Amino acid sequence: MRALARLVARADGRGGTVLVELHGETPLLLRQTPADGGVATVHLVGGAAGPLAGDDLRLEIEVGPGAAVRVHTVAASIALPGRPGAVSRMVVSAVVHAGATLHWLPEQLVAAAGCAHFAESRVAVAAGASLRWRDELICGRYGEAPGGAVVHTQVDYAGRPLLRQSLAVGPRAPGWAGPAVLGGAPATGSLLVVDPSRPADPAAVDGTVARLPLAGGPATLWTATAPDAHTLRAHLTV
C-alpha cells in the first residue's frame, strides 16, 4: 500500500493558526481537533492495520511563519510482517518556518515479531522557530521478541545539521539489546526540544535518562530506556 498525507498551516493574522491544506489517504488519515490556545491540533488516524511489510507511507508537514501546530496519533502504530523480503516504510518530512512552532507527539511505534520496518524523520527548522519532536519505540508486543526496525531522525536548524540519530533493533541488528545500546530494555525513545526563547538545559544523566544540549542550535535532546511504554512516556514528558 502507498499513501501520502499532507498538512500545511498558516498564521491567520489574529493570533491563531489555520490549516490551509489537510489531506490524507488510507491508512494516513488526518483529522483536525479543537485548538488549544491558538495552536492548531491534528490527529493522525490509522485507517488500516499496520504498517505492513511492503507499505510505503509518507507524511508532509509545513508550518508557515507565525503558525503553531500540534500533531498526535490516536493510537500506537504496530509494524507488522507482510510478504517475505518486503520492508515497510514511514517517512515524515517537516518544514518549520521562522517564528513557527511544531509539536510532533505521536504514540509509540511497536516493532511486532517478524516485521521489517524503516521509520525516517526529516525536519528543517528555520532560525527563530520552535520544535518539540518525540519518537518512542517498543521492541515487540507483550511476551514476544521484536521484529526488525530502524528509526532514523535528521533535523537541521537554520540550514545546518542539528541532529543525526539512528537506532536499529531486531534479529538483524547485532548487539541492540546489549549494554552498549538498550541494556535489555524493551522501550526506548527521545525528545528533541528546540526553543530559542530558553537556554539549552545542561547535560545530565539520571538512571536511564540522559539530557544533552546540542551544539547546532538552542536545543536539548532527552533520550531514555524503560521497562514499559508508560514509564518511557513519563521520562519523555518535560
Image (cartoon, rainbow, N blue to C red):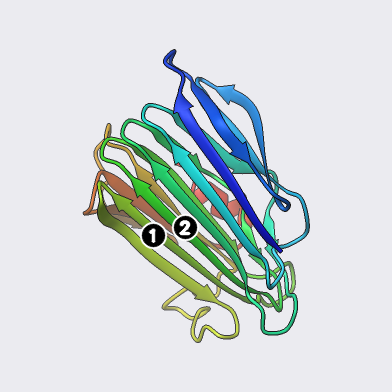
Q: Residue at point 67% right, 57% down?
A: 77
The extreme top residue here reads 14
Please give the name of the residue rendered at 61% of the width and 53% of the height, measured from the top-left corner.
4
Can you identify the residue that label 2 sits on? 121
**Above or below, comparing residue 175 to residue 53 in the picture:** below
- Left or right of 176? Residue 215 is left
Q: CA distance from mark 1 to mark 2?
A: 6 Å
Q: Is residue 59 above or below residue 117?
A: above
Question: For the point 29% across and 55% down, which residue is it?
Answer: 162
> Quick one: label 2, few (<14), some, or many (20+) residues within 10 Å?
some
- What amino acid type should be assigned to the residue bearing mark 1? Gln
Tell which residue pokes out farthest to the right in this image: 48
Mark drawn on residue 154 = 1
Q: Position of residue 29 (x, y in %)?
A: 69, 45
Q: Secondary structure at mark 1?
A: strand
Do the numbered discs 1 and 2 sit on residues whose CB atoms are within 8 Å? yes
Front one among 153 and 189: 153
Q: Earlier in the sequence, mark 1 or mark 2?
A: 2
Query: Quadrant of the rendered structure where residue 23 is?
Result: top right
Q: Residue furthest left?
A: 215
Whether residue 81 is visible, yes or no, is: yes
Q: Residue 10, position in %: x, y? A: 46, 28
Q: Position of residue 223 (x, y in %)?
A: 42, 58
Q: Residue at x 68, y 72 (%)?
A: 54
